[in-house]
Image (tube, grey):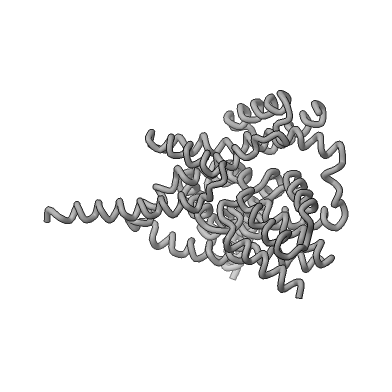
Amino acid sequence: MAYTRRINYDGVKSYFSLFFSFFKIGCFTFGGGYAMIMMMQRELVDKKKWTSEEEFLNYLSLAQSSPGPMAINTAILIGYSRLKLRGAFAGFLGAVLPSFLILLGIAMFFSRIYQDPVVVSIFKGVRPAVAALILYPVFSFAKDLKYWEYPLLLAIGVAIYFSISPIWFIMGTILVAVLYVYHKTRTLKEPS
Amino acid sequence: MIYWQLFVAFFKIGLFGFGGGYSMLSLLQAEIVTHHHWITTTEFADIVAISQMTPGPISINSATYIGYTTTGSVWGSAIATMALCLPSLILMIAASYFYVRLRNNLYVSQIIRSLRPVVIGMILAAALMLFNKENFIDYRSYFIFAIALIATLRKANPLLVISGAGIAGYILF
């Protein structure tokens, strides 16, 4: 009896720790979902060691190839990978609640906050720093790429910047990867 | 009725909004401003401004804000935000289920490996989009950017970087 109770307690604790990690990240990622990537990397990969950097990049690939807010997708995927279905909900709630509560507060009470001169000058400092935070994962992930993938990365980045939808690159890449594996498995089978 | 319309509109945005962040803005604008007239273009620009000053994904911020302003009730916010995230929840739980089983499949692992330059390119694009006149006003902004980038590359705590940049902004601007 005491044994099961302890397991349940640990279970609740790990759901809470998952929730709280994402809640903390969600509270401080000014500048949209992409700023969350770097925070997640620090908190989930470097500090908590819940996933490796390579696994984390795989989850990001899944999250970015799917519709919906990318940071929320990532939270659901990592939550599920840790603690299955309930973990997915814990990660989801942790990531959504901070922006939900803060925006609700602003909508209800301070809808003119962005015109306050003190707030405006603080955010004139924060925004260039956000650009740096978003850029950081580009450097850390690019280390694991092959040399011929660098120009590809740059070209895709610039193309999306000039408002070409990323969906074309995602679909094109999936097609090329499938053809490549199909070709490789066929040529391997032929000699036998 | 307005609750149902909110649900449908934000569910659609959650289902068809690819690329996250600022690439979702045009879809948001088309649905909320052009189609439903829930807010004006000026109010939409205000929401974008608020989103830049508040944490979290911009689409969640818009859903919560518009859900409240159109209904005047917390439930409007909750329904709009839930509707926006529902496609993510369903798709990502399904993706997790299959990923665990298929990660060693040749096709799946090759697809995920090949997507890397695209995924990192999307992050690069998100950073490039911030390099505009609104965010980078003059040399002071570039100064803050350079310090923040060096600090981050040297593994400084991101919360410290953000707070430091906020203080620098308060002093410099």
In this view, the residue farthest toward the bottom is: B1
Which residue: 34% across, 58% down?
Answer: B105
| In the image, farthest residue toward the left | A192
Visible residue check, residue A179: yes
Q: Which residue sits at x=72%, y=68%? A: B6
The image quadrant that residue A148 belongs to is top left
Instruction: Say whether residue B100 is left or right of residue B62.
Output: left
Instruction: Give the percent coordinates (x, y) of residue A67.
Output: 55, 58
Placement of the C terminus of chain A among the 4 image quadrants: bottom left
Up the image or down, A147 lies above or below A95; here it is above
Residue B162 in sight: no
- Residue depicted at 70% across the width and 31% down the height: B136
Quadrant of the image for the N terminus of chain A? bottom right
Q: In this view, does B5 lie above or below B60?
A: below
B152 vs B85: above or below: above
Q: Where is residue A129 in the image (x, y as percent from the top left)?
A: 68, 34
Residue found at x 76% / y 72%: B2
Q: Report whether B87 appears left or right of A126.
A: left
Q: Pick whichever, B162 or B126, lies toward us.
A: B126
Height in image: A167 above or below B14?
above
Q: How many labels does the image show?
A: 0
Q: Nearer the viewer, residue B1 or A77?
A: B1
Whole-percent x, y for residue B74 in the image? 80, 65
Q: Which of the 4 image quadrants contains residue B9?
A: bottom right
**What is the x, y in percent for residue A132?**
62, 34
